[in-house]
Image: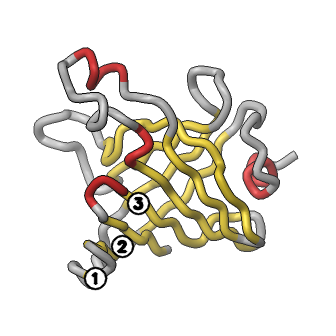
Amino acid sequence: MNFIKYIIEGNNYPPQGAVVFDSSDHIRFQDGQNVSGHNYGCNRRLVIEKNIQGDEGYTVTMYNLDGIHPLWQNNIQMAPKRMKIIGVKEDIVEFRGVGYDENALAMGAPLQNASFENYGIVIMIEDAAIVRAQLNMYDRNISIVYLK
């Protein structure tokens, strides 16, 4: 079975696998207002895979395909977050973060700041492929819509 079928079914216990969405444009929203316009040529990759710790749900990571970050020395735009599917409506699937970032807690971050519940994604699926994705950062009231 194609991995994306497990997502469409709302299955939080998928087998091994992943689905990838590459975007070349995004729009940033703050408090529901467009604050950036289109960002054409900003290449990002969203990867949704079986939870890398083997637990329920998925691991969601965002990569910057335009190069290596000078400080972090990698191309990770959003560090891996554990998420579960919380809703499916036709071709729209919503994920919400679960658990805490143990690394952030170990560095002394407050519990609220280390919560994966601050993050969520919503994906639109057509013809067994992701065609649009939205990253929600609930604690900052920011959404970024990623387009093909």
Q: Is residue 127 toward the left or the right of residue 115 in the image?
A: right
Q: CA distance from mark 3 to mark 1?
A: 14 Å
Q: Which mark is residue 33?
A: 1
Residue 121 position, x and y percent, is 50, 57
Q: Are marks 1 and 2 in contact (CB under 8 Å)?
A: no
Q: Is residue 12 left or right of residue 74?
A: right
- Identify the residue at horizontal 58%, vertical 46% (top origin): 48
Of the image marks 2 and 3, the number of the one nearer the N terminus: 2
Discs 1/2, front: 1
Q: CA distance from mark 2 to mark 3?
A: 13 Å
**Label 1 is placed on what type of residue?**
Gln
Instruction: Tell which circle, 1 or 2, labels the residue nearer the N-terminal end.
Output: 2
Whole-number angstrom distance, CA of label 1 to CA of label 2:
14 Å
Q: Is residue 81 left or right of residue 111?
A: right
Q: Judge whether 123 appears above or below 98 on screen.
A: below
The numbered mark at residue 26 is: 2
Can you say whether 31 is above or below 93 in the image?
below
Which residue is disc 3 drawn over?
Answer: 136
Q: Kindly identify the amino acid type of the residue bearing the numbered disc 3.
A: Asn
Circle 3 — which element? strand
Which residue is pictured at 28% across the width and 83% down the height?
34
Point 67% across, 68% down: residue: 92
The location of residue 40, given as percent across then percent down, is: 31, 78
| Residue type of the residue flagged with mark 2 | His
Q: Nearer the viewer, mark 2 or mark 3?
A: 3
Instruction: Rate crowding at label 3 as few (under 14), some (14 to 19) or many (20 or more) other CA atoms within 10 Å.
Output: many
Secondary structure under the numbered disc 1 in the rendered image: strand
Q: Secondary structure at mark 2?
A: strand
Mark 1 Cα shell of 10 Å, populated few (<14), some (14-19), many (≥20): few
